[in-house]
Amino acid sequence: MSKTEIEHSETSDDAGDEHDHPSDNKYIQIAIILAVITALEVATYFFEGMPGEILIPLLLIMMVIKFFYVAAWFMHLRFDSPLFTKFFVAGLVLATVVYVIALTVFEFWHKG
Amino acid sequence: MTENEHSVGTGVSNNKLLMWVFLGSECLLFGGLISTYLIYRSRFADGPAPGDIFDIPFTSVSSFVLLMSSLTMVLSLSSLQRGDYRNTRLWLLTTALLGALFIGGQVYEFTTFLREGLGYSTSPFSSAFFTLTGFHGVHVSIGIVMLMSLYVSSMRGNLKRESSETLEIVGLYWHFVDVVWIFIFTVIYLVPSPTS
């Protein structure tokens, strides 16, 4: 292994395994944010007059925000090696593409 | 380096990488189950429709319980990384109990649905619903078994600060199960469902 390769390997180790995790207070802050978003999601159930064109995108946006908070902070993707993110995102993107195609084939979007 | 040799070092933990690859593949499993549910949710035949049978306030409480179990999981890992074994066990046990509470809620929901005439083979909607939420429940149950194994291991003094990666990997699985429920709760329960 050349000197450059060794340096790269050591850098990767630092980025991958020897990372600093957030404090307990930060985790509690994240949990409070997640709880507030969940409360907002549930609140939409009681607003019966809200049209689907607004309600569904609103719910999906809140869902995605919650997903990113859990993945980035609790699963440590924000601090870990980018390689982990790549594998996870690859699975997510592949699943999304495959099943959007499947739903299109079954004319899901036409049924609303 | 000879012609047949190649570098296999990624610079990251192989065990952690394996868990992330597994979680990536799990996205495909749950993506398939969620898509199947979406396709069949309007086909409830003569059985109850999803919009008539879902109890959103009850499921909201279950969702909150599972969400908070992610916090206790990460607090357990944080305690272990500090070498605080007492709190590691306390948060591990709390996480397992919250998971068990979620499963208890799911069993209650399933039995209520059965009493109201929604069995597994009542309609394509019911089959897709029970398969999706049942698969998720099995994942949570497996997570509880892993958490309790780590708890016992810690009681025996085998879960040390130096081996905190084991707890971190189980934590990744647990958080993933929570992430999947975030999707299920929104797409299956909160997005308005068809009524009869």
Image: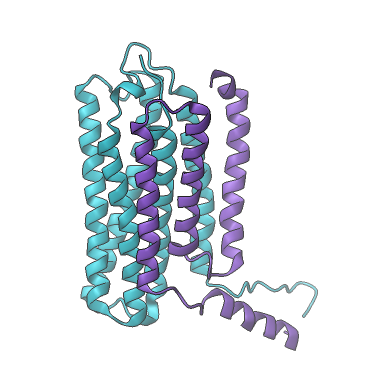
Chain colours: A purple, B cyan
Q: Which residue sits at x=31%, y=69%?
A: B76
Q: Residue furthest right?
A: B3
Q: Is residue A2 visible?
A: no
Q: Where residue B184 sits: x, y (%)? A: 41, 39
Would you say B130 lies left or right of A64 here? Answer: left
Q: Where residue B94 sits: x, y (%)? A: 23, 61
Count of numbered tags: 0
Vertical order, B139 against B55 (above or below) = below
Vertical order, A44 against B81 (above or below) = above
The C terminus of chain B: image quadrant = top left
In the rendered image, which quarter is residue B190 located in?
top left
Vertical order, B150 against A65 (above or below) = below
Q: Where residue A2 sits: x, y (%)? A: 75, 86
Vertical order, A11 against B191 (above or below) = below
Q: Which residue sits at x=24%, y=26%?
A: B113
Q: Where residue A5 sits: x, y (%)? A: 72, 82
Q: Is residue A17 visible?
A: yes
Would you say A37 lies left or right of B66 here? Answer: right
Q: Nearer the viewer, residue B105 or A29?
A: A29
Would you say B115 lies left or right of A88 here? Answer: left
The N terminus of chain B: image quadrant = bottom right
Q: Residue furthest top?
A: B46
Q: Which residue sits at x=53%, y=66%?
A: A78
